[in-house]
Image (cartoon, grey):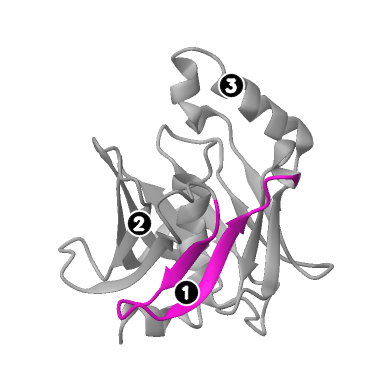
Amino acid sequence: MSALTSLANVDQLFVKQRFTLMVNTYDISTLGPDGRSAGEPICFVKQKRMKIREEINFFADESQQEPVLRIKKRNVLEFRGVADVQLPDGTVIGQLKKDFGKSLLRSTWQILGPAGELVATAQEKSLAMALLRRGWGWIPVLGDVPYFIPFHFEIHVGDTKVGEYSRPATGISDRYVLDLTGDPQRVIDRRVAMAFTIALDALQDR
């Protein structure tokens, strides 16, 4: 069973960022029984830094022999605009877009369908924590170490809260938990949801 096939029935994901130079790398797994650690591995993610056109690649495992998904910005100059979520053959299965107006105070993202239709929104839950993170980013040296301040996003489909995405204030590495158990109909494509977990770290400009 492929990583994307097994993902279709997964409502909770665990993401861990590795400490590496020049690249962002992540391990994505199911959420372990304790609700705080990794379960079964799903894929390995790699983002090359210092690229004009953002591209983040998802692979079946660390060997990087089997691509399964990618996030790709629309054009060279669109540093913070819409990013397509694509299958290896280039088929667009969803889009991710940061709402910059609302993000001035609290980071807000839109999860879109393949044709750009709105599927869900995600916004930082706490205004106070959002402002604290922004203040931290202006502190020399410390601003480059953002993992001491956790964030917590709430995900809504229309007016209904269907999930949460959070980074606990534990450990020295970035660890994230996505919980979409409030979306049993799986309105949100789980492949796009998985891509979103990485975009919130790699493209967030925290």
Closer mark to the observer between disc 2 and disc 1: 2
Q: Mark 1 = which residue?
A: 191
Q: Position of residue 60 (x, y in %)?
A: 26, 71
**Element assignment for label 1:** helix
Sooner in the amino-acid sequence: mark 3 or mark 2? 2
Quarter of the picture holding the N terminus? bottom left
Q: Position of residue 66 (x, y in %)?
A: 20, 74
Res 33 visible: no
Residue 55 falls in image quadrant:
bottom left
**Element assignment for label 2:** strand
Q: Residue drawn 67% across and 46% down?
A: 100
Indicate whether 80 appears above or below 88: above
Within-10-Å neighbours for mark 2: few <14, some 14–19, many 20+: some
Q: Mark 2 = which residue?
A: 55
Res 4 visible: yes
Mark 2 belongs to which amino acid?
A: Glu
Indicate whether 167 appears above or below 3: above
Quarter of the picture holding the C terminus? top right
Q: Residue drawn 35% across and 77% down?
A: 90
Q: Position of residue 166 (x, y in %)?
A: 59, 49
Sooner in the amino-acid sequence: mark 2 or mark 1? 2
Within-10-Å neighbours for mark 3: few <14, some 14–19, many 20+: some
Residues tagged 2 and 1 counted as in contact (Cβ below 8 A): no
Q: Which residues are magenta?
A: 81-101
